[in-house]
Amino acid sequence: MNTQGYFLEATENCMAFTGYDRNKLIGKHFSEVGFTRLEYTQKLMNMIKKTLQGKPGMILELEASRKDGSALFIEAIIVLLKKRVILSDFLQS
């Protein structure tokens, strides 16, 4: 995703875990897609901000929802790569 939280690409793992198609994700803000709850949306945006300020890669465990509404527990790892924020592949716990 970019530094504002918009998806630039979607991995096969991301699509498999969330149930969303690549076309549904690309260009959308992660909060628009609907798989993160509000409390985690703010935490994720704070992590992006800290990463842009030079903090080392950060990890956030969060509860999300798949497209079908079922619960998904993921670990988000955020790193800065050429002024793009990379949200690593979804790791299911």
Image (cartoon, rainbow, N blue to C red):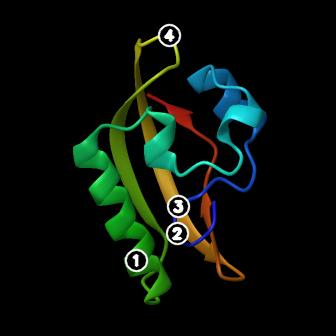
Q: Are marks 2 and 4 in contact (CB under 8 Å)?
A: no
| Quadrant position of residue 34 | top left
Question: At numbered mark 1, what does the secondary structure look like: helix, strand or loop?
Answer: helix
Marks 4 and 3, how far apart at CA: 23 Å
Q: Residue at x 30, y 37 (%)?
A: 37
- Above-or-below relation of 19 to 23: above
The crowd level at tag 3 (other Cα within 10 Å; few <14, some 14-19, many 20+) is: many
Whichever of labels 3 and 1 marks the residue nearer the N terminus, that label is: 3
In this image, 40 relative to 66: left or right? Answer: left
Residue 54: x and y in percent read 47, 89
Marks 3 and 1, how far apart at CA: 10 Å
- Above-or-below relation of 40 to 69: below
The residue labelled by disc 4 is: 68
In this image, 24 relative to 69: left or right? Answer: right
Which quarter of the rendering shows the N terminus?
Answer: bottom right
In this image, 20 relative to 75: left or right? Answer: right
Q: Are marks 4 and 1 in contact (CB under 8 Å)?
A: no
The residue labelled by disc 3 is: 5
Q: How many marks?
A: 4
Please name which of the two marks, 3 or 1, marks the residue nearer to the observer: 3
* Tag 3: amino acid: Gly
Residue 67: x and y in percent read 53, 18
The residue labelled by disc 1 is: 49
The residue labelled by disc 2 is: 4
Q: Nearer the viewer, residue 66 or 78?
A: 66
Marks 2 and 3, how far apart at CA: 4 Å
